[in-house]
Amino acid sequence: MSPDQVAAFCLQLPGAREDIKWGSNRVFSIAGNKMFAILDFLGDGLAFKVDHDLFLGYVDRPGVRPAPYLARAHWISMATPFPFGDEELRQLLTRSHQLVVARLPKIRQVGLLL
């Protein structure tokens, strides 16, 4: 997937919006300010949240590393071209979205769960 395809996919997820933050980072978030993905992260990369029990498995893969400043929250980052296939990347971005939704208060989760 290209960065523009990643952005288009992220914006299709329920409640997702895009903002430009910290210079040129394209931040995808829900519920106002809860980030689930960042494009152009530290230059030309992509970063997103993964399940904490799978975090170490992902960072062992070639081309994937802990996201600077966000690794303690189980975020991974990668440069383009992304080391995941299109379908796997879509699943991971959807899971990142759902991990963030699950941390919202129940009243704010309505309409955001898949």
Image (cartoon, rainbow, N blue to C red):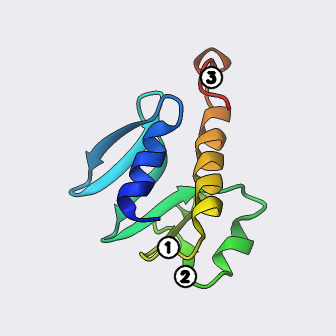
Checking the image for residue 18, the label placed there is: none
Looking at marks 2 and 3 on the same chain, the residue that comes earlier in the sequence is marked by 2
Task: Please name the residue shown 59% across and 71% down the image.
Answer: 84
Identified by mark 3, the residue type is Gln
* Quarter-of-image position of residue 100: top right
* Quarter-of-image position of residue 28: top left
Element type where label 1 sits in the image: loop
Between the C-alphas of marks 3 and 1, the distance is 30 Å
Identified by mark 1, the residue type is Phe
* Quarter-of-image position of residue 61: bottom right
* Residue located beneath label 1 in the image: 82
Q: Quadrant of the C terminus?
A: top right
In the rendering, at what x and y percent does residue 52 appear? 72, 57
Looking at marks 2 and 1 on the same chain, the residue that comes earlier in the sequence is marked by 2
> Does the residue at mark 2 contact the one at mark 1 (Cβ under 8 Å)?
yes
Task: Please name the residue shown 63% across and 60% down the image.
Answer: 87
* Residue located beneath label 3 in the image: 109
Between the C-alphas of marks 2 and 1, the distance is 8 Å
Vertical order, 12 against 61 (above or below): above
Task: Please name the residue shown 68% across and 72% down the image.
Answer: 58
Left or right of residue 22: residue 61: right
Nearer-the-camera pick, 104 or 18: 18
Element type where label 2 sits in the image: loop
- Give the class, few, some or many, for how many residues have Cα within 10 Å of label 3's Cα (few <14, many ≥20): some
In the rendering, at what x and y percent does residue 112 appear? 60, 26
Between the C-alphas of marks 2 and 3, the distance is 33 Å
* Residue located beneath label 2 in the image: 63
In the rendering, at what x and y percent does residue 16 appear? 45, 35
Looking at marks 3 and 1 on the same chain, the residue that comes earlier in the sequence is marked by 1
Residue at the far top in the pictured view: 107
Identified by mark 2, the residue type is Gly
- Give the class, few, some or many, for how many residues have Cα within 10 Å of label 2's Cα (few <14, many ≥20): some
